[in-house]
Image (cartoon, rainbow, N blue to C red):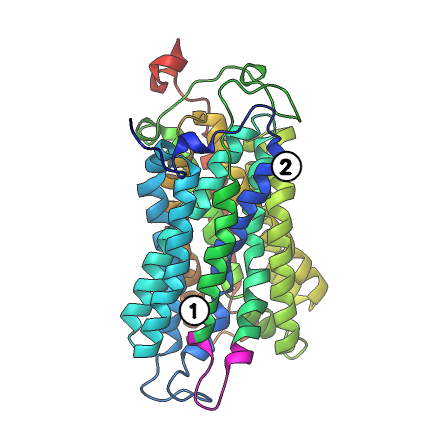
């Protein structure tokens, strides 16, 4: 007789009458943890002063070197989500979330060792590679599960989880800052013990999600709001391997890539952009507040826009993202010319809400197109668009800004060309989204095609 592990898929099947609203807290425990990645920038300056403590020395790491750690983590988020997506669907969310907790937590510990030894490659291996794999597994496993629990409101369900990822920085940033302050001394920046503490805390918190996650029963009844499977219309099911052979997958890949490239480009330069465009009106502290406001709109947009998509459809919501977003990018230079800080802030806040909404809506969009049989694996493969955009967006806006400034263009206008390019990219996304139509039944699995 085969001995079953607590982590096996069979042990995560919900009992009869299980309330599906108990599942979102498990998903949030994972996403609020891995969402810490968005707060990594709080470590940038301290990591450049590990030897000098109060200032950087020639032997310290440079800011560009340290900044690459975040990009590396995002790259491995997308790669691991793509590689392990089918494994997730096979073994179930509990085992995948357990692996995520181990990788994400141990990534901090390995990075702490690398900082202690002052070996940047070891920090990159820990936080960027091992931690990035934890990011990818942690990102897709709750989303796939929630889609199965909420077939009637998939946009709202994925919005709840991915809202947690956007809010992870709101916990991770003050946590890291306060820990570094408490551990700081005349001979230490406090980063190493902070990494160790956060690794242990996040691993423990993520275990709450591991132990409480449940999958719906095939024979689930309508108790406590849980739907019967046959209460939803039949739809074709497409495997992950077959999905990437469809044009719909690649049109959605382009849509996500464009939306993330434009949004992350703006987010990565938000603080210097508002200071340079409205110099000397906006101080450094005010710019920091502006970045915090953008994070709030990013967070809110993930839930509101994705929930709205349950009523008007995913394709229409993405059309709004791209059409309205392109207009907002085109208007940004004008807000600078008229010197209106409130209009600039409102414009950027709306853009950020749609940037977050794009992340939260895409899993439900995939579910509409390909069914739920391997939606986690399909979502994982699509997230390679995020990995690519995570590199292209910040690089695009920072490099073009430097080129403009070297050409003698005044700082207040150095971003105009970049913003026009980003608006053009969103128009490309608009037309890519228009090309998304129902999947040809020839791609369905034999069981769902009958």
Residue 201 picture location, percent across and down = 50, 61
How many numbered dots are placed on residues in this image?
A: 2
Residue 36 picture location, percent across and down = 50, 60
Magenta segment: 180-192
Name the image quarter holding the C terminus.
Answer: top left
User: For the view shown, which residue lies furthest in the bottom direction?
Assistant: 186
Question: Where is mark 2, residue-wise?
Answer: 307
**Which numbered dot is residue 7?**
none
Asked which quadrant contains residue 84, the reply is: top left
In the rendered image, residue 187 lying in the magenta stretch gets the answer yes
Q: Residue at x 62, y 41 (%)?
A: 305
Question: Where is mark 1, residue-wise?
Answer: 196
177 lies left or right of 236: right
Q: Nearer the viewer, residue 378 or 407?
A: 378
Vertical comparison of 378 with 439: above or below: below
How busy is the neighbourhood of tag 1: few (under 14 within 10 Å), some, or many (20 plus)?
A: some
Q: Nearer the viewer, residue 6 or 248?
A: 6
């Amino acid at each position: 007789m085969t001995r079953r592990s607590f982590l096996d898929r069979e042990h995560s099947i919900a009992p009869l009458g299980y309330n599906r609203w108990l599942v979102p807290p498990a998903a949030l425990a994972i996403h609020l943890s891995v969402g810490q990645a968005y707060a990594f920038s709080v470590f940038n300056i301290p990591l450049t002063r590990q030897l000098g403590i109060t200032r950087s020395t020639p032997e310290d790491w440079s800011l560009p070197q340290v900044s690459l750690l975040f990009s590396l983590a995002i790259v491995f988020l997308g790669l691991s989500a793509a590689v392990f997506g089918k494994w997730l669907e096979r073994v179930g969310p509990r085992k995948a979330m357990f692996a995520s907790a181990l990788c994400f937590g141990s990534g901090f510990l390995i990075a702490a060792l690398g900082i202690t030894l002052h070996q940047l490659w070891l920090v990159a291996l820990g936080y960027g590679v091992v931690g990035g794999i934890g990011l990818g597994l942690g990102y897709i496993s709750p989303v796939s599960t929630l889609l199965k629990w909420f077939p009637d409101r998939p946009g709202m369900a994925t919005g709840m989880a991915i809202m947690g990822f956007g809010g992870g920085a709101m916990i991770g940033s003050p946590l890291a800052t306060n820990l570094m302050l408490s551990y700081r001394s005349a001979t230490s920046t406090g980063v190493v013990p902070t990494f160790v503490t956060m690794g242990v805390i996040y691993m423990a918190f993520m275990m709450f999600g591991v132990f409480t996650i449940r999958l719906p029963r095939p024979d689930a009844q309508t108790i406590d709001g849980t739907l019967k499977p046959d209460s939803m219309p039949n739809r074709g099911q497409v495997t992950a391997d077959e999905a990437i052979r469809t044009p719909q997958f690649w049109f959605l890949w382009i849509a996500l890539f464009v939306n993330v490239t434009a949004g992350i480009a703006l987010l990565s330069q938000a603080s210097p952009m508002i200071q340079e465009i409205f110099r000397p009106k906006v101080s450094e502290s005010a710019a920091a507040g502006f970045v915090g406001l953008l994070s709030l709109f990013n967070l809110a947009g993930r839930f509101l826009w994705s929930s709205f998509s349950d009523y008007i459809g995913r394709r229409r919501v993405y059309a709004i993202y791209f059409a309205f977003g392109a207009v907002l990018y085109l208007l940004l230079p004008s807000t600078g010319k008229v010197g209106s800080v409130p209009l600039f802030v409102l414009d950027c806040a709306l853009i950020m809400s749609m940037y977050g909404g794009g992340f939260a809506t895409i899993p439900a969009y995939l579910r509409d197109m390909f069914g739920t049989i391997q939606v986690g694996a399909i979502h994982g493969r699509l997230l390679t668009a995020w990995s690519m955009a995570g590199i292209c967006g910040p690089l695009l806006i920072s490099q073009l800004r430097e080129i403009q400034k070297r050409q003698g263009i005044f700082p207040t206008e150095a971003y105009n060309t970049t913003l026009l390019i980003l608006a053009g990219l969103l128009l490309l996304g608009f037309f890519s989204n228009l090309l998304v139509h129902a999947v040809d039944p020839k791609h369905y699995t034999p069981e769902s095609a009958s």
